[in-house]
Amino acid sequence: MLLTPKHLPSQGKFIYNQPGLNVLPLTFRQIVNYMSHPEANDVLAYRKDLKLLEENGINLEFVSLLDADYLVYFMKSLTISDSLKYITTVTCPHCGEKIQTEIDTADFQFLDYEDSKVPSKITLGGKEYEIEVPTIADFIKCLDNYSRNNASLDLDHIKLLSVFKEYNQNPRIIEGEVLNVRGSDAGILLWLEGLLFDRVSPIKVQCPNCSGGGGQVSVSVNIDHINRTFFRDFMWNNPITEDQVHFKQICPDG
């Protein structure tokens, strides 16, 4: 399915040399391989998702990291449902209740970016850093750099570090300087992270257990949860129906 720039969170402002992106569903072979070889952590699983985009014809050298989550979500949606709807399970953080809810791609609101609000430089600890939103290909280099030298992997940290233009040249130095800031500088990083990567409005689902006492307790379903659990949820909660598969009756001999 062809996505034009207006369909993307970046509105095409950060897509280079392409009129649009043709997103394809995964093949059966890719689905089986994906489910048969789970990754050890969320960071490696995210890398795997991004590489699947590349396997299916998306040139990651020309696509912004700002559109990555949307493209992964859209690719998986196309893979499991022509209607782009499916059922997922979320857990209430208050009581532990498992809640089934139907998700539609239209339910998630990916907020558009504005060029004027993305800074080109920020100052932390008196030092100025150049900021540049990377392509997905450059982000994968950052992810690999970070993974080689850190036992504890945090996807939010890696995304944030990737927008520092010098990171791939001096990863250890930038990590030490950026991730250890304090006070108002930490506030600047939180603002920058929210501006660039907290761009999806979560879906609200009512917990029947907590709301039974008269209160209205909402559970947020965020895009990270959906992308991580997509195929597992689909297999568990979306069984094949009789109108999809027909069995031939076999009569006994004689």
Image (cartoon, rainbow, N blue to C red):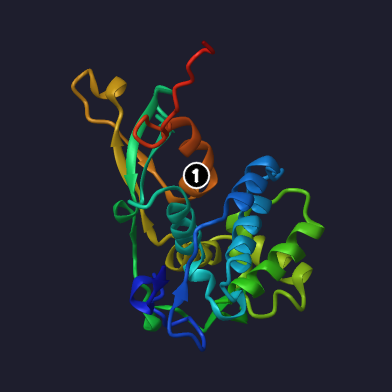
- Kindly give the residue lying farthest to the right in the view shown: 149
- Kindly give the residue lying farthest to the bottom in the view shown: 17
Q: If the image is split into quadrants, where does the N terminus sit?
A: bottom left
Is residue 181 visible in the rendered image? The answer is no
Asked if 168 appears above or below 187 in the picture, the reply is below
- The percent position of residue 136, horizontal first and vertical second, equals 59, 71
Q: Number of numbered discs present?
A: 1
Is residue 210 visible in the rendered image? The answer is yes
| Amino acid carrying mark 1 in the image | Phe
Helix, strand or loop at label 1? It is: helix
Residue shown at 52% from the left, 75% from the top = 64
> Is 85 left, or right, of 45 in this rendering?
left
> Is 142 left, or right, of 28 in this rendering?
right
In the image shown, does 98 or 160 lie closer to the viewer? 98
- The percent position of residue 90, horizontal first and vertical second, equals 42, 34
- The percent position of residue 77, horizontal first and vertical second, equals 43, 53
Asked if 114 appears above or below 158 in the picture, the reply is below
Question: Which quadrant would residue 138 be assigned to in this image?
Answer: bottom right
Residue shown at 71% from the left, 70% from the top = 141
Residue shown at 54% from the left, 13% from the top = 253
- Kindly give the residue lying farthest to the front in the view shown: 254
Asked if 223 appears above or below 23 in the picture, the reply is above
In the image shown, does 101 or 145 lie closer to the viewer? 101
In the image shown, does 103 or 192 lie closer to the viewer? 103
Question: Which quadrant would residue 160 be assigned to in this image?
Answer: bottom right
**Mark 1 residue crowding within 10 angstroms, few (<14) / some (14–19) / many (20+):** some
In the image shown, does 38 or 191 lie closer to the viewer? 38
- The percent position of residue 49, horizontal first and vertical second, equals 60, 57
Asked if 233 appears above or below 94 in the picture, the reply is below
* Residue denoted by label 1: 230
